[in-house]
Image: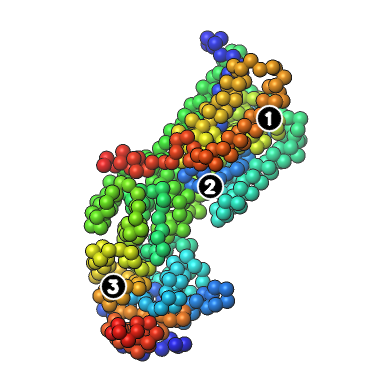
Amino acid sequence: MASDVVDAPVVDATAVPRPRIRVQNAVKSFSGRVVVDVDDLVLGDRPIEGLIGPNGAGKTTLMRMIMHSTPLDRGTITLVPPGGREVVLSDLPAYALAHRGVVKSNQVIMDFPKLTIWDSTLLSVTEARYERPARIFSEQTVFKRHEEEIRHYLDYFGFDDPDGFALSAGEKKLLDIVRCLLLKPTFLLLDEPTAGLPDELTEKVMEVIRELGAAGTSVVIVEHDLNVIWGLCDEVHFMAEGKVVLRGDPQSIREHHTVVESYLGEGHV
Amino acid sequence: MPIEWLDAFLITGLFNVAMVTGLALLLHLQLGLARIANFGVVGFWGTGMYTFGVLYVQVDWPFGDPWQFLVCAAAATLVAGLAGLLIGWLIADLDIDGVLVVTLGFATAVQILATTQDDITGGARGMGGLGFPFDIGTVKENEFLWLVILAAVVAAILFYVWRVHRSPYGRSLIAVGGNEPLARSLGKSTLRTKLWLFAVTSAAMGLLGAMYGVMIRFLDVGQIGVGVTLAAMVGLVLGGTARVWGAVVGVVLTAGVFDIVIQSYLPLPREWYTQAIPVLREAVFGATLIVVLLFRPLGILGDMQRDRLMRKLHGE
């Protein structure tokens, strides 16, 4: 499984203009072991794409490289907005990616321990000009501007006590996703978004992702719950040993002998 | 002005308590919200004090007070703010050990510079020639008025800090202190936040230093020792690093007890005040810090209560 051969059918998806991310010659090693080595990969051709592969394949590291959470050893990562100028994401500071619409949810639980759920969502939507030291009277302005959209998501996902803190792992995971949604991403990367969530909430998350994809946001999901991948994605990338070795529609990837042999097992198909 | 009931020791003691409260409030923004442990508070305070003193005494201004004071104090505030910008930039990506070393190093550098550049600072001999920007009568009356002005400045700092807790800026500081990578992923320039924080708080520390210089009217390098940082740090930690009123409660219980109760009201032998009390003060402050961190790390007032505050702010 050493080449980047694409032998599953590639779906033509140029109909809807949407942002793409191009990863070129991107390499990352840890302690001499190459974890990611991608020659040329375009993400975002289709509204919702999945990234699957065995543990250690490099999926999360690739996502982190795109977001600057993990620095590249070499290579470039470029955002290609529809009809706009290309932006080399790997030249931007990490915080600037969200300003370009590139947002990622986290695989491990990440939260602000001293901020309530409302706090956390307000933080996400607050523009930089309101966060300057002199703007000590702008809380109500920010709250009024964004109350409706925040309340929409908090109600939709049914947080127990939005004025309090996110307590359970599931609530923190959900809050992480809500923070990302409030940033109005044009390119959303989701790293195991439904891990630890009950079925009902998983379905709600999937529904929101579908709506985003239909509205023009490019979504890439890393997920071990393959029902989410098969049920949601328009295209699937299969990674192994740091490389993307296959891409195609969910059905063809699901049945591909390489995927079955190295990842799914015979009983899954 | 009928202030016979006040003795000079009490005015000095109250001035010290108000000033340390101001420093502790500013430190609260750095340590309590953004979780940056600045051990060089005295460096910024001393920068303000000496910048003010040098400009006030050494420069031949074409105008007198109060303009001379205002110009020199503004310059001292600006220089301390720029020092804060520099130090903030240096520590932006450092862990807590690195922050400790850089901030302590900065405070030491300020003290060494004030000592060695004796042609402009007076060095170990000290520098006189400072005075109040007004003259309303006796020294005691002038000192009292200066105490009232300082109290107004500290009250303004308290109000600012109180408002910061209720603003998006305060929320961004708490976010930076709680999870910086997550804040960055949400589009927050955490470097800019830290630089603004250090510039503004250091500038205010510098202003307090300049005002202290006016009060004592004679600068010497012994005044910019670690004791100032220790007093602000101990007061804040004892009261509660995360609470607005933590700085006030803590400083009243520490500097208030030593600089007012012991200095003014306890019938102690006179010779103790020059040698034993200052040493005892620092020893007790240090011990208090250890005890509080061991047994009540969140201080007397405990942790911040964002849930209650958010309910109050947004009416749930």
Q: Would you identify the image quadrant in which residue A96 lies?
A: bottom left
The front one of A12 and A243 is A243
The amino acid on which the numbered mark 2 sits, given as a three-letter code, is: Ile
**In this view, B97 is above or below A208:** above
The amino acid on which the numbered mark 3 sits, given as a three-letter code, is: Val
The amino acid on which the numbered mark 1 sits, given as a three-letter code, is: Val
Task: Describe the element under mark 2 as helix, strand or loop.
Answer: loop
Chain letter of disc 2? B
Q: CA distance from mark 3 to mark 1?
A: 68 Å
User: Is the residue marked by circle 1 packed among few (<14), some (14-19), or many (20+) residues within 10 Å?
Assistant: some
Task: Describe the element under mark 1 as helix, strand or loop.
Answer: helix
Tell me residue B101's x, y (percent): 64, 49
Q: Would you identify the image quadrant in which residue A42 lies?
A: bottom left
Tell me residue A211's x, y (percent): 24, 67
**In this view, A66 is above or below B233:** below
Q: What residue does disc 1 label?
A: B279
Q: Is residue A245 left or right of residue B192?
A: left
Q: Residue at x 47, y 29 (%)?
A: B155
Chain letter of disc 1? B
Q: What residue does disc 3 label?
A: A228
Q: CA distance from mark 1 to mark 2?
A: 28 Å
Tell me residue A62's x, y (percent): 44, 73
Q: Residue at x 26, y 68 (%)?
A: A206
Q: Is residue B275 left or right of residue B75?
A: right
Q: Do we see residue B57 in this rendering?
A: no
Q: Residue at x 75, y 39 (%)?
A: B116
Q: What residue does disc 2 label?
A: B36
Q: Is residue B255 left or right of residue A245?
A: right
